């Protein structure tokens, strides 16, 4: 039986639960967990003031129940185990995680999987800006792992991403894959302006019905039916991400860029011929 | 009244080298031991078995002002990964990294036993900001050096051959900024950088655009003026061609250009390279001829600017150098242009022990420590944060006191260091007394601070008490007690108090009639009004004016 933390907080001040991880909670009693120090604004408070604790952490699974849109850093730094959020989650969920799995039934805030180094995150709703991105000042965003968002996301997803997979079922905002170093970003809805700006390598798939105008520093290469894309999309399906069969069979236009950064990256959009 | 009893005292300025004794402190200063046996101190620190030294003095670091703030903002990733200073009843919260936040800087210096620090490169236009940051940098007495090596008025005065005008300007500028000493950074070179794309001077005799003078004339002129004004620290010089292979000749020429005037060459490690231009394979240590020259000339002192391996941030008033480093490392870069006065370059940098160049830089620093015969002429510095953070000081102490340790470090370095540096063949190990000289007594003397760097009667009661340990890094990284002007700041290795410290500055005398010419020039070219430029005493935390002795040449 998993450990369930039911959110009872009634506050507009941010609550931060950094360090509250499945591995750290193993072998701790409910009493100890209730005393675990979390931040309420800039003050430390015992977790019991904001959560009702039940179940056992022994099986490495932690369930957060309730509207946690004001609760941040859930699963940050996680290296193993499973976290399920039955409701919405706040910012920085799965930040810098190296392993384990996070599932969110509702929506999530900004910085989902920021500088993630491994593991798996699946958001069933929408998410904010800077998914899998580098924190300000850092040279690299996510370096490994998989982030799946079923609905829409904001701007600058995959900012300075180095490796890994980021898939979005809905629309995305501006500057997808800005300064991207490598990795894969697939967006199945429409995207905002300047996709792939300053990308060095990696692949951005923009599969929406209305492909955006690309920057003039991207040049069209060909129309093709990439086998590797079929394999990657089938793999996403296996992880519970919805991919329409149409995407497995259609042709795509390939663009190379960003030429001001060497032009080794690629953007794939629906073929104009189809 | 505070008594420190039974400690093993190292006070080289007073000829005391490991003698057990007591120290008495009252009203922030050392006093004679009371003759009346009935006199009892209000507090006694039992230092039996411990090492007692004056508080440490960092005479060349970058801890305040716009350049440091840019570095703080530029390196959030470094701060996220480093220790955080949490708010307590005694301390403000803060961040570390290579450019720690203001309060964190003061706490960390105090935690290492340092009680005085000088920021080495402040454009006088930004002096007010620096004084305000000093107010938030506790536990330290502080001062700063004022950038003048590329100042338009100074260069014009030198060009016009008017030493009296230069003297007056320098005196006015130091007094207006409430600074401590004139600083030359790549004299003339920064001005050329500001005038030409990618420009710089190549040596001491390259002409500076628009001013028709050379770096040699600037060095000679400012050094002479600083000595004529009797400044406690007449001139602090960052030579031209920093970091370039073959730059040792420029450094030697700079020493000669002082023409016997007292001068301090800073982070000299970065200026002691042999080799051909751009050819890494010929890069080597040229400390031997330079150290010979320093050993033979009493007007010269140096601080090392030791490189230590790891990540840091280069911040310098040497604009072209910042550009060079950012290109070498492909890193972030900031370049500043401070009107008529100075430039600035900032870029992250990582020193790797497997890199030939970085390993040699590390080794060349050691060459300097071990090849200058008189420890009173050499000062420990990392040019914080350029060579490394000041937090590396305990490790440097260990390298100097333990040759086995430094030889073990050498084994991990690029193999060419062994043949291209001198230190692998030098067995010299520093004693505790010599460490006390290069970290306290020496810098105090070089800075002309008669009340600091020693434990004699009347001196500021700045004391650090260490627990002896075989591993000198362990010993020096966690002093048991630190006392700042009689107040116990660190007790049992914990920070107990955070006094604000004084601001050390000079106000040399000058002919007030000269001011009208300065004002006329100022109003023509500056973005602010002349009357708004000088920093009032209200901006200074506990101002302490250090006397100048005009025309009275100091000796080391």
Image (cartoon, coloured by chain):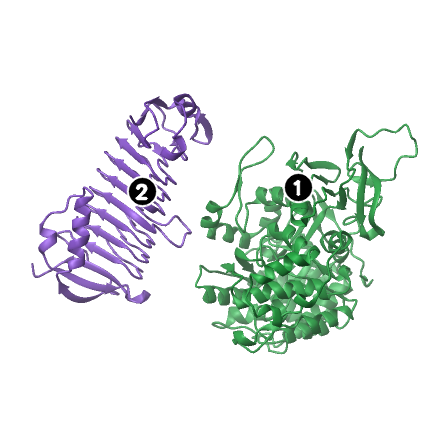
Picture layout, residue B482 above or below residue A50: below
Q: Is residue A147 left or right of residue B118?
A: left
- Residue A230's x, y, as percent? 15, 54
Task: Tell me: residue A99, above or below residue B221.
Answer: above
Secondary structure of residue under mark 1: loop
Contact? badges 2 and 1 (CB < 8 Å) = no
Q: CA distance from mark 2 to mark 1?
A: 41 Å
x and y, in percent, of residue B31 in the image: 85, 39
Residue B527 in sight from this viewpoint: no
Q: Residue at x 80, y 43 (%)?
A: B8
Q: How many marks?
A: 2
Residue at position x 32%, y 35% from top?
A90
Residue ID for mark 1: B139
Left or right of A75? Residue B63 is right
Q: Which quadrant would the N terminus of chain B be assigned to in this image?
A: top right
Q: Colour of chain A?
A: purple
- Which quadrant holds residue B176? bottom right
Q: Which residue is mark 2?
A: A112
Expressed as whole percent of the image width and height from the top left, the position of residue B79 reads 49, 47
- Chain letter of disc 2 in the image: A
Mark 1, Cα crowd under 10 Å, few <14 / some 14-19 / many 20+, is: many
Q: Which chain is green?
A: B
Q: Give the farthest residue toward the left.
A: A274
């Amino acid at each position: 039986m998993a450990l369930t933390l039911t959110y009872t907080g009634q506050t507009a001040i941010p609550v931060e639960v950094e360090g509250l991880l499945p591995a750290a909670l193993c072998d701790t009693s409910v009493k100890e967990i209730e005393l675990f120090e979390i931040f309420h604004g800039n003050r430390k408070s015992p977790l019991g003031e904001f959560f009702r604790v039940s179940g056992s952490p022994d099986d490495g699974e932690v369930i957060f129940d309730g509207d946690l849109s004001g609760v941040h850093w859930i699963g940050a730094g996680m290296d193993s185990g499973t976290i399920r959020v039955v409701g919405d989650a706040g910012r920085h969920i799965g930040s810098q995680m190296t392993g384990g799995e996070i599932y969110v039934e509702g929506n999530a805030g900004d910085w989902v999987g920021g500088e993630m180094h491994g593991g798996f995150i699946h958001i069933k709703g929408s998410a904010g800006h800077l998914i899998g991105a580098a924190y300000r000042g850092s040279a690299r965003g996510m370096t490994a792992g998989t982030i799946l968002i079923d609905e829409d996301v904001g701007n600058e997803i995959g900012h300075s991403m180095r490796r890994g997979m980021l898939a979005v079922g809905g629309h995305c905002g501006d500057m997808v894959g800005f300064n991207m170093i490598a990795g894969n970003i697939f967006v199945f809805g429409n995207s905002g302006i300047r996709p792939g700006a300053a990308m060095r390598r990696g692949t951005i798939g923009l599969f929406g019905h209305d492909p955006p105008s690309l920057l003039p520093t991207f040049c069209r290469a060909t129309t093709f039916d990439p086998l590797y894309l079929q394999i990657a999309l089938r793999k996403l399906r296996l992880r519970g991400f919805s991919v329409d069969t149409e995407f497995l069979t259609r042709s795509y236009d390939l663009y190379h860029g960003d030429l001001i950064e060497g032009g080794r990256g690629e953007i794939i959009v629906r073929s104009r011929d189809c | 009244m505070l008594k420190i009893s039974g400690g093993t005292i190292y006070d080289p300025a007073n000829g005391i080298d490991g003698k057990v004794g007591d120290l008495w402190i009252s009203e922030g200063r050392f006093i004679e031991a009371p003759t009346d046996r009935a006199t009892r101190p209000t507090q006694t620190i039992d230092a039996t078995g411990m090492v007692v030294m004056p508080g440490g003095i960092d005479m060349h670091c970058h801890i305040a002002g716009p350049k440091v703030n840019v570095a703080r903002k530029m390196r959030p990733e470094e701060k996220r990964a480093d220790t955080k200073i949490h708010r307590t009843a005694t301390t403000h919260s803060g961040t570390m990294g290579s450019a720690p936040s203001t309060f964190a800087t003061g706490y960390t210096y105090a935690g290492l036993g340092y009680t005085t620090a000088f920021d080495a490169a402040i454009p006088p236009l930004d002096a007010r900001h620096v004084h305000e940051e000093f107010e938030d940098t506790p536990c330290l007495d502080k001062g700063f050096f004022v950038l003048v090596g590329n100042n338009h008025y100074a260069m014009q005065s030198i060009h016009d051959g008017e030493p009296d005008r230069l003297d007056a300007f320098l005196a006015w500028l130091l007094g207006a900024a409430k600074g401590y000493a004139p600083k030359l950074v790549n004299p003339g070179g920064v001005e050329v950088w500001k005038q030409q794309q990618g420009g710089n001077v190549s040596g001491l005799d390259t002409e500076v655009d628009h001013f028709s003078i050379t770096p040699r004339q600037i060095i000679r002129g400012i050094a002479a003026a600083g000595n004529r004004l009797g400044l406690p620290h007449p001139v602090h010089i960052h030579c031209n061609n920093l970091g370039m292979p073959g730059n040792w000749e420029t450094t030697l020429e700079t020493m000669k250009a002082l023409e016997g005037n007292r001068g301090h060459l800073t982070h000299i490690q970065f200026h002691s390279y042999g080799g051909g231009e751009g050819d890494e394979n010929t890069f080597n240590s040229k400390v031997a001829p330079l150290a010979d020259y320093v050993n033979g000339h009493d007007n010269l002192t140096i601080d090392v600017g030791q490189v230590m391996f790891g990540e840091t941030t280069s911040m310098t008033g040497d604009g072209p150098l910042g550009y060079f480093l950012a290109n070498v490392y492909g890193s972030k870069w900031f370049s500043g242009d401070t009107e008529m006065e100075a430039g600035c370059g900032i870029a992250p940098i990582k020193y790797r022990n497997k890199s030939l160049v970085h390993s040699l830089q590390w080794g060349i620093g050691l060459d300097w420590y071990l090849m200058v015969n008189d420890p009173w002429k050499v000062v420990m510095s990392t040019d914080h944060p350029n060579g490394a953070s000041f937090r590396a000081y305990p490790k440097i102490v260990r390298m100097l006191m333990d040759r086995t340790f430094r030889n073990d470090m050498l084994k991990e370095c690029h193999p060419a260091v062994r043949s291209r540096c001198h230190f692998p063949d030098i067995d010299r190990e520093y004693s505790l007394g010599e460490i006390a000289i290069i970290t306290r007594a020496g810098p105090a003397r070089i800075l002309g601070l008669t009340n600091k760097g020693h434990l004699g009667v009347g001196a500021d009661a700045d004391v650090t008490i260490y627990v002896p340990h075989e591993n000198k890094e362990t010993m020096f990284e966690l002093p048991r007690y630190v006392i700042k002007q009689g107040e116990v700041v660190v007790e049992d290795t914990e920070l107990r108090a955070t006094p604000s410290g004084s601001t050390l500055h000079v106000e040399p005398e000058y002919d007030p009639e000269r001011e009208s010419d300065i004002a006329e020039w100022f109003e023509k070219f500056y973005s602010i009004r002349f009357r708004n430029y000088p920093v009032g005493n209200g901006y200074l935390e506990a101002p302490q004016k250090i006397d100048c002795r005009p025309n009275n040449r100091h000796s080391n």
